[in-house]
Image (tube, helix red, strand yellow):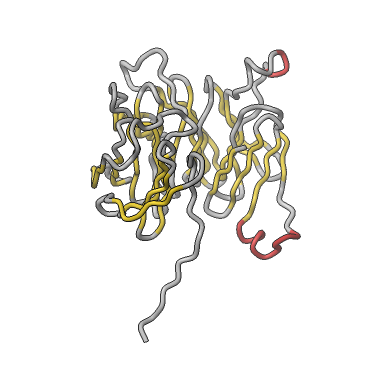
Amino acid sequence: MHLYVGKEWSSVYYDGSGDVVFLNEHELEEQGGSYTPPRLYVGPQHGAAVPLDGDLFAVTPQHPDYESDPEEYRLPIGADIMTLDGEVLHSETGCDALHGDASNGHVAVFGCRGGALFVEVHGATYGGGFVPAPTGASEDFRLTSLWGYPDLDHFFALGSEVGLYVVHPEEGFMEQLIPAAEGRAPINAAVSHDGRNLLVAMSNGELRMYDAHDLDLHAAASDFLTAPVETGFWARPHMATAPGAVYITDSVGGKVLMLDPDDLNTIDSWSVAGNPTKIAFVGLLEEYEAS
């Protein structure tokens, strides 16, 4: 199952079933337990669905050869711009081994072998295309995880063997931010809750914080995660931010740590039974006037 949270809509994609559920934040708040979210069926696959502006969504259709070999063709090769009623407004294909997705509202980007696929919405105009890997990239270049933020024009894309890239879909190019060097490779990333910073976890246990807009390195910290750091897809460190804090999981040490959002120094930590991996922050921020 894949959950993607947008500005007003969230989407839940159920791998293998072909079911997609869309959740409207305001309608859910108003209707509570009586809320019946819109649903679509797009065919069994290991796919994705992300919200776009105007109550539209970028949804992957089933691979055209899926029925002939469901295991071989479980990954889609394209994305459709769809309405809540399932009407397809635009389609893009040509994304071999599609995995990973992100949206900024008017553009949705998907990771591919050889580059990244995107679809875009500008009012009543729809389009898309393919952003190729930089010149000189290896033949097995593949992006598998992506991050975006509302109104941020570029995206961040990670491939475990190729490093971390900044993708500029509407300008048609991508650039490498961090290479995948031996013993020092990017293994996960996260955009902060306010869209200001990009957090990057490295295979040597270092955590870096970049300005998400101009890409300047603001801070870095190391030696706070239990070594050796787990670099696999499921148990690698995951980050979440909140006002005044950065949280990161340490699956090897069985801990969740709270870091200072300015210098990434450790403020607190909590032991967790088992091996904590993914993390999300849910809460309310209240401001009180001085009496």
Residue 276 visible somewhere in the drawing: yes
Residue 171 visible somewhere in the drawing: no
Q: Nearer the viewer, residue 133 or 183?
A: 183
Residue 86 falls left or right of residue 130? right
Q: Position of residue 159 (x, y in %)?
A: 41, 26
In the image, residue 249 above or below residue 131 = below
In the image, residue 163 above or below residue 9 = above
Q: Quadrant of residue 25?
A: bottom right
Q: Position of residue 180 (x, y in %)?
A: 32, 24
Q: Quadrant of the C terminus?
A: bottom left
Q: Position of residue 208 (x, y in %)?
A: 29, 41
Question: Which residue shows up at 46% across the image and 26% down it?
Answer: 130
Residue 41 falls left or right of residue 114? right
Q: Position of residue 195 (x, y in %)?
A: 38, 51
Question: Which residue shows up at 63% across the image and 18% down it?
Answer: 73
In the image, residue 23 above or below residue 86 = below
